Amino acid sequence: MQYSLIPFTSSFVLAVITLPLFIGFMVMHHEGQQIRDEGPKWHEKKSGTPTMGGVVFVLSSIISSLWVALWQHNLNKSLWVLIIAFFGYGIIGFLDDGLKLYFKRNLGLRAWQKLLGQIIIAALIIIIAVSDNFPFELYIPFVGMVKSAVIFTIFVLFWLVGFSNAVNLSDGLDGLATGLSIIAYGTYAYMAYEQKAWAILIFTCSVIGGLVAFIIYNHKPAKIFMGDAGSLALGGGLAAVSIYLHHPWSLLLIGIVFVGETLSVIMQVISFQTTGKRIFKMTPIHHHFEMLGWSEWKVDIVFWIVGLIGSAIYLIFIY
């Protein structure tokens, strides 16, 4: 209980108390989301909805992780790596969101600025992992276990940057990324419990607590969006957790919707640039289903079910 229920409850209480105050502050200062021009036209009514709500659950998760870990004498380098990944990518998202709000536009950080920040955070994590004697080995399908600092470093950089952006792409409908993240972090909490990785269990349960509080205000019709401050943090945290539980490839199934969202964008770009034709009506793929007439609730529920199935398949047949 001290490794799961207490951090969950602490983060939930902190977030559920703070979120209404944060929403009120954003509304009072007229700080709201700028909707993309190329997005679905019916999303224009969401313009002005308070954003950057990720700041609340990120901070509540970190505060809860730190005090519970300190209390339980589990404040180790593994936890620091997870917090750095979570907070570091959250900071990048915070800067991106802040610029959008300040200049009242849909463009925040430049792509290269965001990528550079993501790489720097990933490099810092690798440096800490080296000091923690983390085994720089990676299982490669059809090859086996490969022990190579170079290959492992490249993989970590790709994994952290890739999945932070994957969750970001999925954050396009009310509650979608929040629900998917609850499922993914819940799956890793179970794996951490099975491995007796208490620091990781404390962290994942803290994040879940913050997200459960957040979805109260983020489900359709959303009173607040998480913004890049939340989505980048969630993706970076998931990648770091999968690596530190020594099951990085698990994220391909546990985060199957995040992967699908990303692949839909890549496929769309490649198809349009090479043939001039689009595969989907709109990407990321959740917008494709909206264009087919699905309601946001239907897309959310179906995608959450797919996320649950992916996690169940991994835990039952692979883990």
Image (cartoon, rainbow, N blue to C red):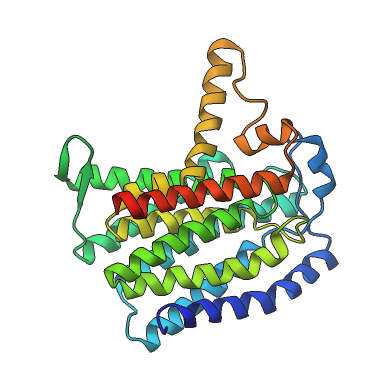
Between 132 and 226, which is closer to the camera in this rendering? 226
Q: Residue at 50% across / 49% down in the picture?
A: 307
Q: x, y percentage for residue 246?
A: 27, 57
Q: Is residue 287 left or right of residue 231?
A: right
Residue sticking out furthest to the bottom: 71
Does residue 233 appear in the picture of this structure? no
Question: On screen, 153 above or below 197?
Answer: above
Viewer-nearest residue: 108 or 2 = 2
In the rendered image, the vertical position of residue 29 relative to residue 305, given as above or below: below
Residue lying farthest front?
316
Q: How far across and how far down the image is residue 201, in percent?
A: 38, 71
Is residue 289 among the parts visible in the rendering? yes
Q: Residue at x 72, y 38 (%)?
A: 294
Q: Quadrant of the C terminus?
A: bottom left
Q: Is residue 80 left or right of residue 38?
A: left
Viewer-nearest residue: 298 or 50 = 298
Q: Is 115 placed above or below 227 here?
A: above
The residue drawn where x is 67% and y is 34% is 289
Quadrant housing residue 72: bottom left
Where is residue 40, by image quadrant? top right
Q: Position of residue 315 (x, y in %)?
A: 35, 55
What count of labels does the image hold?
A: 0
